[in-house]
Amino acid sequence: MDNLIEIKDVTKLYIMGLEELYALKGVNVNIAKNEYVAIMGPSGSGKSTLMNIIGCLDTPTAGEYKLNGKNVNEMEDDELAEIRNKEIGFVFQTFNLLPRINALNNVELPLIYSGKSKDERIELAENALINVGLEDRMTHKPNELSGGQRQRVAIARALVNNPSIILADEPTGNLDTKTGDEIMNLFEELWSKGNTIIIVTHEEEIAQNAHRIIKIRDGLIADDYLSEKGKRIAEQNNMIKSTN
Amino acid sequence: MNFFSEIKENIVISYQAINSNKLRSLLATLGIVIGITAVTLMQTAIEGINLAFEKSIAAVGADVLYVQKFEWFGKEDWTFYKNRKELTMEQYDFLNKNSQTATVMAPSTGVTRTVKYQDLALQNVFILGTTYEYQEVSGFNMIEGRYFTQRESQGGYPVCVIGTDISDAFFENTDPIGKTIKLGNFNFTVIGVIEKQGSLLGLFSLDNRVIIPLERFFSLFGDKRGLTYNIKAADINNVEETKEEVRWIMRKARKVPYGQPDDFGVNAQEAFKSTYESLTGLIKIIGTMITGLSLIVGSIGIANIMFVSVKERTKEVGIRKALGARRSTILSQFLIESSMICLMGGFIGLLISFPISLIIDAFVLPTAMPLWIVVLSLFISLMFGILAGFFPAYTAAKMDPVDSLRYE
């Protein structure tokens, strides 16, 4: 299987005054298309830095990062912006919707930056909102929506440009358990439709929804294994293969 | 994303931003409103003063030359000109005979006297003695009666034409034609009234005059007074040519030796204009600069607000960047926002200054707000918007997406 993400010996160095701090100390990860991965770790472990690098919000100090065959580590700001626009759909803990504009306009944003026409944008944004079950909330502004609905808008926005990866940073962190479960079910559904999903979390329970768990500690990968769910799926796949 | 659709989208975004911060945007743009109001009113006033000036020197025809021993706005002391020899009738005849480029000319001289009609009297009325050609040179029309004829002029008949001020003072309810008025001690018959001509620079009324035949003037008030030769050039676009010709004939007539300066002046409207321009030019520049200063102060206000706005929307910038906005997109978003605020200010400024200019026009001095001022002031607002917005927008554009997303 082709790797969608290839991370090789990636380090990230922060210099704060006279102090040098390695947030990542040589990380190697490959993630294939249509995987469902959780990146776990306590705060300060380097998981946010890894997420920022995977999301092309930041570049590694050293090492190599290939996304969809493209070498990202040497890109300029504007090229990174284009990659973020086309390849990555972000879902944040605090939703990060623009407060002044309605749900539809929020979902429209990535399409504006990829230069789609108004008509096309409206159509795609409406479809994305329908897919997350918000067909009757399109003209509501974020402050007129519940937390779960806001996160659905954010997911619709992440999906609208048909990216290679959905990158979710603590997507249930600001939601109650019930709403959180609904959102996790939505991710499962998106995965089954062929999306690649990476969730960053520090909650074991949330991580168990994913099929593969990567644990980070002190800037290194401490563990990389299949979750219970992942094992079941792997077994099913093997059964299918052996019956063939 | 192509340039125009980016601008279009950013206009929409900026509109939303301004709309959600109406009061702040309005206060921010107040400086620009005041600046544009000041600049446009200043320019409108300058236009008005120019118009008023043009109008007030219209009595001095643009194609008329005035040969006198004095030079208008000459550099020398007044006594220097006063000691020159007077211009005489002999010299006039010589000039009249030899000039090729003048259409018509008339000599004139004047004196100030009290003018009486029955028991009414007007003091300090200017009595102008001239010939029948004078009307054609000056180009005025008669509202009543007629100007005097060649026969009356050369024969020195006791007839006169009067200005409207005199006509209004003496003949409010009666027909002035045929009435006898006293110029000093001498009786004259009124044969015509000149249309209202206004005054020269608001100082010297042209309507408070009585015009009589020069021959009569000489015999009553003496013929030793210096003359003015009023000369109408054949071609308004070639007044200079006539001026040069008149100069050379006059030098010959007055026997000015070769190499010596003229001992007379060939005066024209142009002298007023150049003096006016040298007097007011600096005032205009300073006025424009001072009012321009208020625009700069205004744009500093906009820059300040834009810095606050960018800081406040750090998170928004982070979100937009995460979703794929380039640096240039963010830059243009904030530039367009500040330009729109400034343009709005310019627009409000025009909305304020236009009615004020109408009020000035109606009550103070005739003026007009020309279209170029409107276009220019909107353009200036736009420029100041871009100027004021640049550094805040640049700050936003180079924000780090990770840091700005984390900003609360």
Image (cartoon, rainbow, N blue to C red):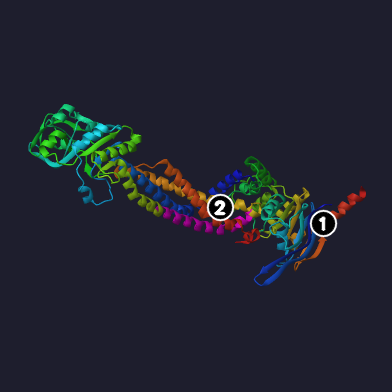
**Vertically, is B245 above or below B283?**
above
As drawn, which residue projects farthest toward the right?
A243
- Magenta residue span: B291-320
| Residue type for callout 2 | Phe
Query: For the residues tagged 2 and 1, is the chain the same?
Result: no
Please name the residue that numbered disc 1 is placed on: A230
Using the image, tell me which numbered label, if any, was put on residue A172: none
Work out whether residue B49 can be spotted: yes
Q: Nearer the viewer, residue A93 or B356?
A: B356
Q: Chain of mark 2?
A: B
In space, the residues marked 2 and 1 are separated at their CA atoms by 47 Å
Please name the residue that numbered disc 2 is placed on: B334
The residue at 87%/52% (across/down) is A236
Is residue B301 inside the magenta stretch? Answer: yes
Q: Chain of mark 1?
A: A
Q: Nearer the viewer, residue B275 or B288?
A: B275
